[in-house]
Image (cartoon, rainbow, N blue to C red):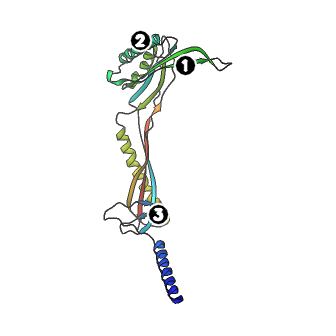
Amino acid sequence: MRSKFMAIGVAVLAIVALSACSALAPVQSTLAAGEAAPALGGGTVLTTNGQTMAGVVVVGSGQASAEPEIAEVIFGVELRGDDPAALVDEAAGKVDQAIAAAKESGVADADIRTTGYNLWVETVYDPDRGTPTGEVIYHISHYLQATVRDMDRLGGMLAAVVSAGANTISGVNFTVEDTQALIDQARQDALKDAQARAEAMAEGLGIELGKPVQVSEVSGSYPVYDGIGGMGGATEAAAPSIVPGSFSVSVSIQVVYEIR
């Protein structure tokens, strides 16, 4: 009976040992023929036969710039008072006059749109006791966006809408007609930069660079520059000098190369 129990114990240990060996065995991934090889940590890439090999991972950057061709102006009216109906009427009149001034400055009807409209109530509190006084103040704001396509008329347009009744300009943003062309140019420059970086690394390490096995765009930055903001209303406003600078986009691309 003792020999029988010993035999069963040995069998159990053998099964446990086989299970442990199976658990410790490396797991191999299999890719279908022609399937893209994913990038792995530590600068390695997976080949189509399921084996790993050393690789070169680089990130290339590219940037493209152009002179701004379009200005997007956010302007509007902000008022406060104790009669909401009167505030609504007053704000509407000032906004209508500002829109008319923008059109007279060369902005097309299709290039003017409302971006925000808000009417809210402020409860007045006693500063000493921190309790409501029973007084309320009504606030109204109406914002619009105008797209100015003639940059030479931008300063005059800003002065015109302020003189007509707009008492806030929250931003002037600059862009170009075809941003995609700049993005494409920046992307091509990023690919060239990645290739140059990989070749320099390969030369420095004394290795032969293989073909790229994975390419991914890791970031893209398409900034819009603010020109001015926070202008107050005036009876007659002088045209401000606007310096748009340049509009730029940047792209970063990660490329994984084989090592031959």
Q: Earlier in the sequence, mark 3 or mark 1?
A: 1
Q: Nearer the viewer, residue 193 or 59?
A: 59
Specify whether 110 is left or right of 193.
left
Q: Which residue is mark 2?
A: 93
Which label sits on residue 203?
3
Above or below, 45 against 177 in this view is: below
Q: Gap between marks 1 and 2, in whole Å?
A: 23 Å
Q: Nearer the viewer, residue 241 or 103?
A: 103
Give the residue drawn at x 37%, y 38%: 179
Question: Which of the 4 image quarters holds residue 100?
Answer: top left
Q: Estimate how packed mark 3 is, as few (under 14), some (14 to 19) or many (20 or more) residues with alpha carbons within 10 Å.
A: few
Q: Estimate how packed mark 1 is, as few (under 14), some (14 to 19) or many (20 or more) residues with alpha carbons within 10 Å.
A: few
Helix, strand or loop for disc 1: strand
Give the total of numbered labels.
3
Q: Give x and y (percent) for residue 246.
A: 44, 34
Q: Give x and y (percent) for residue 189.
A: 40, 48
Helix, strand or loop for disc 3: helix
Give the residue drawn at x 38%, y 66%: 47
Q: Gap between marks 3 and 1, in whole Å?
A: 68 Å
Three-letter amino acid code at disc 3?
A: Glu
Q: Estimate how packed mark 2 is, as few (under 14), some (14 to 19) or many (20 or more) residues with alpha carbons within 10 Å.
A: some
Which label sits on residue 122?
1
Above or below, 39 against 81 in this view is: below
Q: Nearer the viewer, residue 2 or 66?
A: 2
Disc 1 versus disc 2: nearer the observer: 1
Which label sits on residue 199?
none
Give the residue drawn at x 41%, y 19%: 157
Three-letter amino acid code at disc 2?
A: Gly
Residue 61 seen in this snapshot: yes
